[in-house]
Amino acid sequence: MRAETRRRWAIAGLTGPAYLWLTLTIFLPLSAMLWFSFQRKGPFGRHETEFTLKHYEAFFTKDYLQDLTWRSLEMGLQVTVICLILGFPAAYVLAKRIKGRWREALFLLIVLPFWSNALVRIFSWTVVLRPGGVLDSAVQSVFPGAPSIDLADSWSAVIIGLVHSYLPYMILTCYLSLQAIDDSLIEAARSLGASALTILWRIVLPLAIPGLAAGAVLIFVPVIGSFFEPKLLGGTQGVVIGTVIEEQFTVVSNWPLGGALSFILLAIVLLILAVSYPFLKDRMRTA
Amino acid sequence: MSVVEARHVTKRYGEVRALDDVSLVFPEGRFFALLGPSGSGKTTLLRAVAGFVEPEAGEILLDGEDIAHTPAHRRNIGMVFQNYALFPHMSVFDNIAFGLTVRGTSRADARERVHRMLELVRLPGMEQRKPRQLSGGQQQRVALARALVTEPKVLLLDEPLGALDKRLRQEMQIELKQIQRAVGITAIFVTHDQEEALTLSDQIAIINEGKLVQVGAPNEIYENPHSVFAAGFLGDANILRGRVENGIVAVEGAGPVAARGALPPEGSPAVVAVRPEKVRLSAEASAEGVNRIAGRIFQAVFSGTSVTYIIETAVGTQRAFRQNAGERIYGVGEAVVMEWSPEHTVVVEE
């Protein structure tokens, strides 16, 4: 019993600081924001605290807020799907085909984007994608007279920039799941007569679902809330709910509306996770 | 039933020759063991037959047709893996039916055949279990059922019983052989366990350092090992080194040793082997016409039914194995004479 008590104290002692820190840094600011989202006015200036639901009502009465939220969800979906299509094969090759030093070198290349500042990364894309930019000049020099490429301030530019930023998450999470698949499972399937495609579809993909799901969540959630990538790369085409929320804080100084929209977005994310959870849980347990 | 043949199969990994010009016939309907220490190349040979390793040179014939470069999934060869390799996300039914659904067998037909397979491996009614809900022995049976359900031409087994505990392993050995015989399939299995090779197989090939050491029936190899390695790897052996003098092997410190079979030419070195259970012990030299070495008991390992003696002699430590059939049991330090008949003395290569 004594050892048990000591063990509990040890657990509390070891996990306590981390939980305390998380409580202070996430829970407190978040609850403050939740409080503001129900106030008529922001924290600046002197006024009475006055409880209201009008900022939440705004979302349901103003069509453009709903449209922009849809747009953000669509952006999240597009980026996630493209990351999936690009990331899964890359992760497969890394986990199952390449060994030793080459793998290390390729890993380094994959995580390289993480080493540079996100803003610098996005600004450098504007240099690449604008007319007369790096991409355009390259195409012109190879095919003189080709139509000029102008991706500046476009939806495509936003997607390109976001995929670039978030692709490593998909590769890394898929890599971890694929790495855990025993090669003998694949050999067993081959000896039973399965073609490469059948093995991918019936063995590899189902067993990689935890990695795919983790990657999708890690990408989808931040992408639907993203604001500076759409703003810098999309210009007027890049108006999404994230940029609207950002403006409530930085330009319009309407913190309560910004807070309310943030919580609606959070609710949507939680709803999506809740709906997909039963399906994922079933897959995760067996994998 | 099918016959598999390896012809001059060679495979290198960098500088290491995993298989060096190996030629071997796996006869129809037989249980064939590839026996060797780890890294001997036995697994590489099995994987070459399965199609997971492509030989650099040589042919692998399945019913006379070279399949050395045929993709694994077109070979129709069943394989049981060391760790069973059951698909963890599928039920027992889906695991066994996998090979059938891949071939486009109808659901009803598949159900019928999986059912029959589960009866064969004595796991009826387990269709809906997941692999993780099964014990090691049960997983082994499911893996066997999965490999056999497509009616492959050959069954390959890679250390199939290695992960089971001793009692279960002995049970499975008997059952594996029964099933193989009932199905009448040509089976090739890889093992480093000499006892397993002896009890399971009709034929054994001993492999070492990528080369074939000896092929034959278990008792044939046991009674007539061709080399020191074969004598020592399959069973225990006392090895004596000497020189041929007057048609007999003169072993320095032990006297002349007569052997069965042809000796190397007069004057050249010769090595003979004798199995410990063929050695009799007595306090004094007895009959004429036998080989003998005098020594002293260094250790006597009593295990109930038998005693294994480690004996110090002028030609190194030797072993004797005696059934506990009422014979006198010698104690440590006692002087003894080891005696055995020339008939049990085999000339082997170094």
Image (spheres, coloured by chain):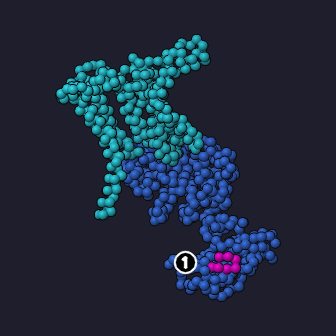
Chain colours: A cyan, B blue
Q: Main secondary structure of the magenta part?
A: strand
Vertical position of residue B84 compared to residue B247: above or below: above
Q: Is residue B334 visible?
A: yes
Apparent side of residue B76 relative to residue B69 in the rendered image (left or right): left
Amino acid type of the residue that numbered disc 1 sits on in the rendered structure: Val
Q: Nearer the viewer, residue B109 or A99?
A: A99
Extreme residue toward the top, this view: A145
Q: Give the residue drawn at x 54%, y 82%.
A: B325
Snapshot quadrant of residue A63: top left
Quarter placement of the C terminus of chain A: top left
Apparent side of residue B256 relative to residue B328 in the rendered image (left or right): right
Q: Secondary structure at mark 1?
A: strand
The percent position of residue B307, horizontal first and vertical second, equals 55, 78
Residue that mark 1 sits on: B301
Apparent side of residue A21 relative to residue A141 in the rendered image (left or right): left
Q: Give the residue drawn at x 54%, y 63%.
A: B196
Vertical position of residue B240 compared to residue A119: above or below: below
Extreme residue toward the front, this view: A46
Q: Give the residue drawn at x 36%, y 40%.
A: A280
- Residue span colored magenta: B311-317
Q: Is residue B320 visible?
A: no
Q: Nearer the viewer, residue A57 or A212?
A: A57
Q: Pointer 1 indicates a residue of which chain?
A: B
Apparent side of residue B314 relative to residue B162 in the rendered image (left or right): right
Say if the magenta span includes residue B257.
Answer: no
Snapshot quadrant of residue A55: top left
